[in-house]
Amino acid sequence: MAKDKRSFFERLTGTASLDDYNDSFDEEIIPAPKKDIRVEMGAEKNGLQNGFAEEEEEGQLSVDVYQTPEHIVLKAVVAGVRPDHLDVSITRDMVTIKGKREEQKEVTEENYFYKELYWGSFSRTILLPQEVEVDGAEATEKHGVLIIKLPKIDKDRETKLKVKSN
């Protein structure tokens, strides 16, 4: 029987054409289900993750950021957060808001139908689209909405300097 002649490229590279192979991979390979070793070890019950104490997960604060002719304005819903539990840090190009929303345990876990509200620590760092004047920043909270007004730096502002003689 004559063997099919391989092309010059196949002989040069030492490869074979796909036609030379049988379709032996027709059967479907189903991977074994993954087991959660934390559940098997009882780590879930003990608050452990991967054998280490589970750190408190931090939520991310949702914000709106917009501009007026003079300010960059940030708004964030912080309902349920006491103002002394808010930490706002400002640099010329970035704002970081951190806080903690504490839950009052009024109902036991088994009596909940839905539990969607976030309780605990949260933070958010926002890179500003323009540099701001840190010293002129204002933060107010009204009806559960935090409003931070940051005055823009006017890079086009020009002042005339008078030269004094001694």
Image (cartoon, grey):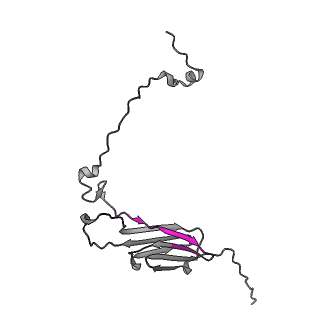
Q: Is residue 146 left or right of residue 109?
A: right
Q: At 55% from the left edge and 74% from the top edge, which residue is drawn? A: 73
Residue 60 lies in quadrant: bottom left
Q: At 50% from the left edge and 76% from the top edge, which residue is drawn? A: 147
Q: Nearer the viewer, residue 162 or 118?
A: 118
Q: Nearer the viewer, residue 154 or 69?
A: 69
- Residue range in magenta is 55-74
71 within the magenta span:
yes
Image x and y of residue 49, in percent: 31, 56
Image x and y of residue 161, in percent: 73, 83
Image x and y of residue 91, in percent: 53, 72
Q: Nearer the viewer, residue 94 or 107?
A: 107
Residue 54 lies in quadrant: bottom left
Looking at the rendered structure, the number of numbered marks drawn on it comes to 0
Q: Is residue 39 above or below residue 95?
A: above
Q: At 31% from the left edge and 53% from the top edge, which residue is drawn? A: 50
Name the residue at the front extreme.
113
Name the residue at the bottom extreme.
166
Image x and y of residue 53, in percent: 30, 60
Q: Nearer the viewer, residue 108 or 47?
A: 108
59 within the magenta span:
yes
Q: Is residue 32 above or below residue 59?
A: above
* Quadrant assignment for the C terminus: bottom right
Q: Is residue 162 left or right of residue 144?
A: right
Q: Is residue 108 left or right of residue 132?
A: left
Name the residue at the top extreme.
1
